[in-house]
Image (cartoon, coloured by chain):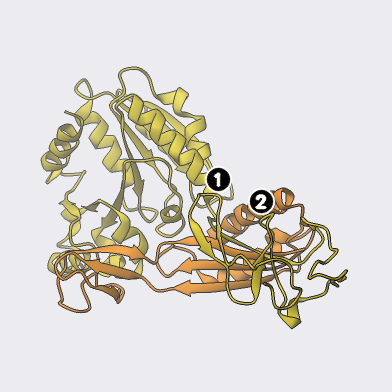
């Protein structure tokens, strides 16, 4: 029995939409129609009209009643739904999709240029590239055997799942094996948006310094692969490889790490071999 | 600032939920934001009123509960708070851990009328 208004027995346990039992906190109760409301004094601004026998007259469900909805719903539900559709679309076609994330200027596009050149004629690739403005990156990636589509995000600092799914038909055909999604250069925002990829690849270039993974732990701990780029510059920049490795291992012990220079080709074999094995 | 697009997503979702619930006023909304979700409390608090302008979420009280990152140790089975940036078990020191919370970005509850 609800101690405040006396309506029926206060159902403190109720199933939510997913069928899981949820517990209604003290001070709230659930009516038979599923409406949850409270009688805590500071929250009440409605009147109960008792007509005897513990019955009260406010209509159920009363849409004008102040009530608390226990939700536990993801804020990015919509994006996650599109990401799920993308993932299903790609999985059905046996396509490996990677979401490449780094700060601007870490060498995402250059690594992709060299990667496409090496995979040309062997593994059919597709590329979706995101930038705030310009189609420079798409132009750089043209003519290397892969279909390329540029998304200009305008003011937005990341790609989202719907945007990416909308252009699948521009780049993917029956032969496609790998889809590279080059995200907007940014280590913060793209980390929060699932695009439907198999996994994220984070790039870190040697001039950026050893502590980038420590400063941006969300993306570097979420990535399944980390590529340390521009190792040809190690003699010229203040970057201790041992420290970089240690910072990465502490944060993400199981991650694959590639150390390479797309410019000189050092370390590229292992990277290409890895991609080939994933699609074999 | 991606908090603005996150806030816009939130406002869209609020509008749908309120429509489904037949509610017209949103008194408060409580979010659960993990320390490792990529969402920062202060920028989000700044962005939310901008995104909410002219919607049922305007002037709503925004309550953000920041949740710690927790890891579960595969060696000893204990759950401990993840001390960023070190991913290791707070009990036995093993590096064989999996993240069990701290990445969530959820609407916990809404107080509507």
Outermost bottom residue? A41
Image quadrant where residue A231 sits: bottom left
For residue A136, above or below residue A39: above
Q: Colour of chain A?
A: yellow
* Quadrant occupied by the C terminus of chain B: bottom right
Q: Position of residue A178 (x, y in %)?
A: 29, 31
Q: Tag 2, which chain? A: B
Q: Residue A61 location in percent, x, y?
A: 77, 55
Q: Say which residue appears at 32% left-offset and 41% top-offset.
A: A198
Residue at x 57%, y 57% (from the top left corner): B6
Residue at the disc numbered 1: A78
Give the Cα distance between marks 2 and 1. 9 Å
Q: Are marks 2 and 1 in contact (CB under 8 Å)?
A: yes
Residue A32 left/right relative to A65: left
- Residue identified by numbered label 2: B12
Give SS at disc 1. Answer: helix
Q: Spot the orange chain and give its letter.
A: B
View extreme (front): residue: A53
Say if labels 2 and 1 share a chain.
Answer: no
Q: Is A268 situated above or below B37? A: above
The extreme top residue here reads A174
Task: State how many labels appear.
Answer: 2
Q: Nearer the viewer, residue A67 or A147?
A: A67
The quarter of the picture where residue A247 lies is bottom left
């Amino acid at each position: 029995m609800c101690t405040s208004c006396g309506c029926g027995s206060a159902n403190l346990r109720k199933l939510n939409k997913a069928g899981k039992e949820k517990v209604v906190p003290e001070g709230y109760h659930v009516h038979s129609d599923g409406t949850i409301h409270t009688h805590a004094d500071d929250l009440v601004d409605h009147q109960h009209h008792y007509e005897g026998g513990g019955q009260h007259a406010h209509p159920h469900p009363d849409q004008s009643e102040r009530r608390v909805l226990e939700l536990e719903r993801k804020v990015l539900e919509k994006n996650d739904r599109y990401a799920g559709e993308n993932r299903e679309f790609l999985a059905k076609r046996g396509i490996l999709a990677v979401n490449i994330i780094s700060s601007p200027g870490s060498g995402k596009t250059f690594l992709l240029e060299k990667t496409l050149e090496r995979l040309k004629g062997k593994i059919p690739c597709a590329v979706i590239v995101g930038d705030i403005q310009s189609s420079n990156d798409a132009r750089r990636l043209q003519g290397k055997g892969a279909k390329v589509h540029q998304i200009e995000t305008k003011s937005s600092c990341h790609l989202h799942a719907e945007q990416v799914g909308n252009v699948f038909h521009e780049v993917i055909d029956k032969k496609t094996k790998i889809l590279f999604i080059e995200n907007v250069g940014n280590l913060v925002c793209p980390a929060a948006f699932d695009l439907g990829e198999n996994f994220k690849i984070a790039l870190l270039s040697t001039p950026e310094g050893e502590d980038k993974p420590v400063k941006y732990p969300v993306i570097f701990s979420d990535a399944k692969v980390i590529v340390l780029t521009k190792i040809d510059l190690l003699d010229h920049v203040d970057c201790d490889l041992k420290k970089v490795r240690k910072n990465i291992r502490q944060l993400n012990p199981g991650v694959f790490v590639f150390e390479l220079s797309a410019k000189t080709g050092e370390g590229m074999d292992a990277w290409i071999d890895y991609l080939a094995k994933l699609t074999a | 600032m991606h908090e603005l697009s996150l806030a816009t997503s939130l406002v869209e979702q609020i509008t749908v939920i309120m429509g489904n619930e037949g509610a017209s006023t949103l008194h408060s909304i409580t979010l659960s934001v993990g320390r490792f979700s990529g969402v920062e409390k202060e920028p989000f608090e700044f962005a939310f009123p901008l995104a909410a302008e002219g919607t049922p979420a305007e002037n709503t009280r925004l309550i953000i509960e920041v949740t710690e990152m927790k890891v579960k140790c595969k060696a000893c089975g204990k759950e401990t708070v993840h001390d960023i940036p070190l991913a290791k078990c707070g009990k036995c020191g093993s590096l064989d851990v999996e993240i069990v919370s701290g990445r969530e970005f959820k609407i916990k509850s809404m107080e509507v009328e």
